[in-house]
Amino acid sequence: PGAYYVTDITEYLMKIIELSKEKDIPLLLIKTPYCGVTLDIQKKYNKVAEIAGENDIPFINFNRHYKEIGINFETDFADANHMNHRGNVKFTRYLAGYLKENYEIPDRRGDSAYGSYDFMADNCEQRIYNLELTQINQIDDYLEKIRGGNYTAVYSITGDYKDILNYGEVRSKLQTVGINLDEADGDTVWVVRENNILFSGSDSIDFEWHTQLGENNNLMVTSSDKSENKIEINLSNTHKYIPVEEGFHIFLYDNCTETFVGAARFPIINDYLSDKR
């Protein structure tokens, strides 16, 4: 299998090289950082380097540049084969610096012919924003971050929340996203988009409410006396959340990327609404 793989590399790499020469496209070959390099794998990298050299094409094995990139194996990898977000940011910046220094690449921002570039840049930026959001534990910081984005959020609160010792503080925080906690009656749910309440209901009355999110997703919020856990949140039957534990819960959907961001819970502990768990 190893010999076949090298043969396979040679065949298809030569096709890429021939096409790039035919179209007069500068070609740069790279190997992204990888922490599982074995002797057999290195032989394959060596074969690529040999082919690149024979055809006057630059090849950079970034496994030889960990220090320059600033790679930390304890924090920058999701697994042996793939960098996580932190590692990818380091590597992308390093690679971008190399490209900028060695190639003349025009700035295509704002060019309608390259609109997909702008779309993907915005999409990636939003996904980073969502990742940062999931790492926040303080409820006020979490709510502030949501207010800065284009989200559809399902907020729910359960248990004896009106008796918690920091009720006034929590009430003030929820007012920032348009929720009046004083009007809540029992376990209550609100669907909010950009601080506009689309729906609210409590477990005292059965309800079934839904809305279309983008082209492909449907959000449904229900409550029924027939269910042990009355309030249920369902996104296209792919993400289901039932706020069981006493406290405040946020089920979050990103309208920009049309993706589920996550569900956060802030439980009531020792008569206080606590940080995210």
Image (cartoon, rainbow, N blue to C red):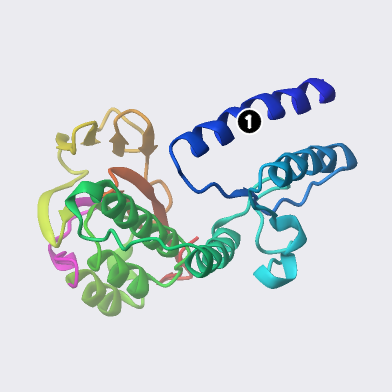
Which amino acid, by three-letter code, is at mark 1? Met
Q: Residue at x 70, y 29 (%)?
A: 9
Residue 152 percent location from the top left of the image: 22, 51
Q: Residue at x 36, y 60 (%)?
A: 125
Instruction: Judge whether residue 183 is colored magenta.
Output: yes
Residue 193, position as x, y percentages in the image: 16, 54
Q: Is residue 159 visible?
A: no
Q: Nearer the viewer, residue 86 or 240?
A: 86
Q: Residues within 10 Å of mark 1 (few under 14, many from 20)?
A: some
Front-most of residues 206 and 23:
23
Q: Any magenta on residue 108?
A: no
Q: Is residue 150 left or right of residue 91?
A: left
The residue that mark 1 highlights is 14
Q: Which residues are magenta?
A: 176-191
Horizontal arrangement in the rendering, residue 177 relative to residue 166 (left or right):
left
Q: Nearer the viewer, residue 84 or 174?
A: 84
Using the image, determine if residue 181 lies above or below residue 244.
below
Establish if 138 lies above or below 21.
below
**Residue 254 place in picture, x, y as percent:** 28, 50
Q: Residue furthest right?
A: 39
Q: Is residue 126 above or below residue 223?
A: below
